[in-house]
Amino acid sequence: MLTTGSKALDELLGGGIDKGVLTQIYGPFATGKTTLAMQVGLLNMGKIAYIDTEGGFSPERLAKMAESRGMDANTVLQRFLVFEIFDFKEQRKTISRLKKIVNETFSMIIVDSITNHYRVEENKSAITADLGKQLQVLLWLSRKYNLAVIVTNQVYFDSKQNTLKPIAEHTLGYKCKDIVRLEKLRPGLRIAVLERHRFRPEGGIVYFKITDKGIEDVEKTKSSQTILE
């Protein structure tokens, strides 16, 4: 497994981000999805294929996270192979190309986010099938090379159930065996909810904060009541 750099999150996930499966991390804007994904890549050896569909990958942010942890920023940045994606068609082609690019030197693949371009397409029935094929390629790569794969996902408001839900919930839910929801409590403070896992109980919740280092645990001295106030 790959550590998240947070003891609480690692415990929630049964040790960290697992290999050979797809892990979905979803939540509203600015809940820490990108920071968490970059941190997992930062703290674990091997190359990272990073598919950036939102323009959220910041080499400056990653360098600052590395330097805050006493790591050499240039060495870290060289491990990230970043693909900037501008439409759903390009996303499909890039994920397919990974079959010729990824090898034993890679430790993980990140797609941030998998649904950014999907949500603006009109013919949902056709592209939903396409999205499923993209996820299948990622799953095949994760198994072939024993990689960790993180796909981040956006949310939409379901007016019928009066709640936020992940985009393409059923398609991603079918392929992603581990699912974590992130929520924002107040500036800098977040919670992670384990919605699905292969061997951990569902519904577990941990608190974390976002700092210059990235994702960090909230001090254990703070009670849940204090955190929620």
Image (cartoon, grey):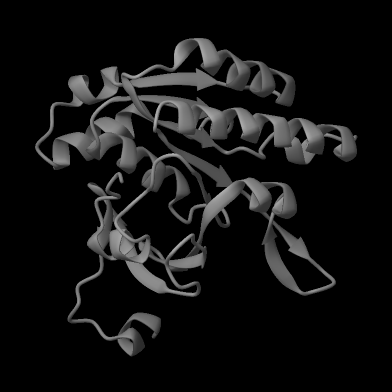
Tell me the residue at 37%/60% (across/down).
Answer: 13
Tell me the residue at 44%/17% (across/down).
Answer: 102
Q: Is residue 75 above or below residue 107?
A: above
Tell me the residue at 19%/26% (across/down).
Answer: 73
Residue nearer the viewer, 190 or 19 = 19
Q: Residue 206, how many percent across, how many down?
A: 36, 71
Give left or right: position of 155 versus 73: right
- Looking at the rendering, which quadrant does residue 228 occupy? bottom left
How many tags in the picture?
Answer: 0
| Outermost residue, left side | 70
Tell me the residue at 69%/62% (across/down).
Answer: 165
- Looking at the rendering, which quadrant does residue 157 occupy? bottom right
Q: Is residue 198 above or below residue 85?
A: below
Residue nearer the viewer, 130 or 36 = 130
| Outermost residue, bottom side | 225
Q: Is residue 162 above or below residue 116?
A: below
Give left or right: position of 209 versus 89: left
Q: Is residue 3 above or below residue 219?
A: above
> The C terminus appears in which quarter of the rendering?
bottom left
Q: Residue 90, how many percent across, how many down?
A: 67, 18
Q: Residue 91, how many percent across, how many down?
A: 65, 23
Q: Residue 57, how many percent across, how many down?
A: 44, 31
- Looking at the rendering, which quadrant does residue 107 occupy? top left
Give left or right: position of 151 versus 5: right
